[in-house]
Image (tube, helix red, strand yellow):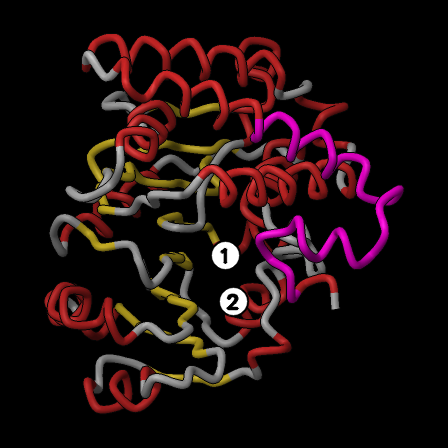
């Protein structure tokens, strides 16, 4: 299959020394059928120049103010003609060059419209960030369709563009990624693909390192933005169910993780962190009743509000 790997970049220089050798090995395996596309959002750290000098693929530039999680990716899809479009973020590092091929292997199943791989925490990631990765990305692969929503709820449409691949024809069938979303362009696409009759595959054997050690305040901001996303796209919750049940399962799992690690010193932070996530989400769902200035301060993606 013709493959295109698309990586949005912004001030990516710190990640390139580890990432570029893996990408070079992947492209070199079968250059005739593999394309690399970097979309640089007007980086100020010389990222575009470094990527151009590496000569692994095309480097296209967009204005930083014009970057949109869905819109920019939709535009990038239109710049390639490959049958499969693979997306990865600049801070995701494949465990090996064949991780991408393992992910793409899911499309042997003609019903699969999108697939995503397993994300492992970086070594220095704090315990809360580690647990999030182990909770969302298990060691067991699966394929889900719309009929599974009665069992898995909102998690049925879950996938992550930090490391995901799409059948280009399926993505265009649903109108591509949606422009103007604060985040969640991947979950939006996942939900639309399921409604269109496609299936989503999770490939545990395709692994990348990708994690964040968010502070409590950063967690609040991220969940505020998730609340905004769900308020803007209410059909997701209407179709697949509200996230509260999954949230309680997560809190219980995180508590069990702390207990297993004997990390009782983190219990106060555990309580505060989850309370702030809940508060952030609830405020995000009601963002329309908040002053614009306050929305910007509470949001992780503050530039989006402009």
Secondary structure found at label 1: helix
Q: Is 42 rendered above or below residue 174?
A: below
Exactly how many numbered labels are in the figure? 2
- Residue 236 is situated, as x and y percent measured from the top left of the image, at 70, 31
Within 10 Å of disc 1 (Cα), the crowding (few <14, some 14-19, many 20+) is many
Residue 192 in the magenta stretch? The answer is: no
Q: Residue shown at 75%/40% (left/top)? A: 233
**Residue found at the far right of this picture:** 289
Secondary structure mainly formed by the magenta segment: helix
Q: Residue 70 sits in which quadrant?
A: bottom right
Q: Residue shown at 31%/26% (left/top)? A: 131
Rendered image: mark on residue 77: 2
Secondary structure found at label 2: helix
- Residue 118 is situated, as x and y percent measured from the top left of the image, at 28, 36
Q: Is 43 rendered above or below residue 80?
A: below
Mark whose residue sits in front, 2 or 1: 2
Q: Are marks 2 and 1 in contact (CB under 8 Å)?
A: yes
**Residue bounds of the magenta highlight:** 276-303
Nearer the observer, 136 or 204: 136
Q: Residue shown at 64%/35% (left/top)? A: 280
- Residue 58 is situated, as x and y percent measured from the top left of the image, at 35, 83
Nearer the observer, 79 or 66: 66
- Is 200 left or right of 12, judged from the image as shown? right
Rendered image: mark on residue 168: 1
Q: Is 275 rendered above or below residue 18?
A: above
Q: CA distance from mark 2 to mark 1?
A: 8 Å
């Amino acid at each position: 299959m013709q493959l295109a790997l698309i990586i949005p970049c912004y001030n990516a220089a710190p990640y390139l020394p580890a990432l570029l050798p893996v990408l070079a090995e992947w492209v070199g395996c079968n250059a005739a059928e593999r394309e690399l596309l970097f979309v640089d959002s007007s980086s100020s750290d010389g990222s575009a120049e470094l990527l151009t000098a590496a000569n692994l693929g095309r480097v296209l530039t967009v204005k930083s103010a014009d970057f949109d999680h869905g819109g920019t990716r939709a535009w990038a899809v239109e710049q390639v003609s490959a049958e499969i479009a693979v997306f990865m973020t600049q801070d995701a590092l494949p465990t090996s060059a064949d991780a991408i091929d393992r992910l793409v292997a899911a499309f042997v199943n003609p019903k699969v419209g999108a697939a995503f791989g397993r994300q492992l925490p970086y070594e220095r990631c704090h315990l809360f960030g580690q647990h999030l990765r182990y909770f969302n990305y298990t060691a067991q692969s699966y394929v889900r369709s719309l009929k599974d929503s009665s069992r898995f709820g909102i998690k049925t449409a879950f996938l992550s563009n930090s490391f995901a691949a799409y059948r280009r024809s399926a993505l265009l069938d649903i109108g591509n990624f949606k422009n103007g979303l604060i985040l969640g362009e991947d979950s939006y696409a996942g939900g639309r693909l399921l409604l269109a009759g496609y299936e989503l595959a999770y490939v545990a054997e395709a692994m990348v390192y990708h994690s964040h050690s968010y502070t409590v305040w950063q967690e609040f901001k991220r969940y505020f933005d998730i609340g905004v996303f769900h308020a803007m796209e209410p059909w997701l919750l209407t179709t697949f169910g509200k996230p509260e049940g999954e949230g309680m399962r997560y809190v219980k799992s995180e508590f069990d993780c702390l207990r297993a690690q004997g990390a009782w010193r983190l219990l106060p932070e555990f309580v505060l962190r989850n309370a702030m996530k809940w508060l952030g989400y609830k405020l995000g769902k009601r963002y329309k009743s908040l002053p614009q200035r306050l929305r910007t301060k509470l949001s992780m993606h503050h530039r989006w509000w402009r």
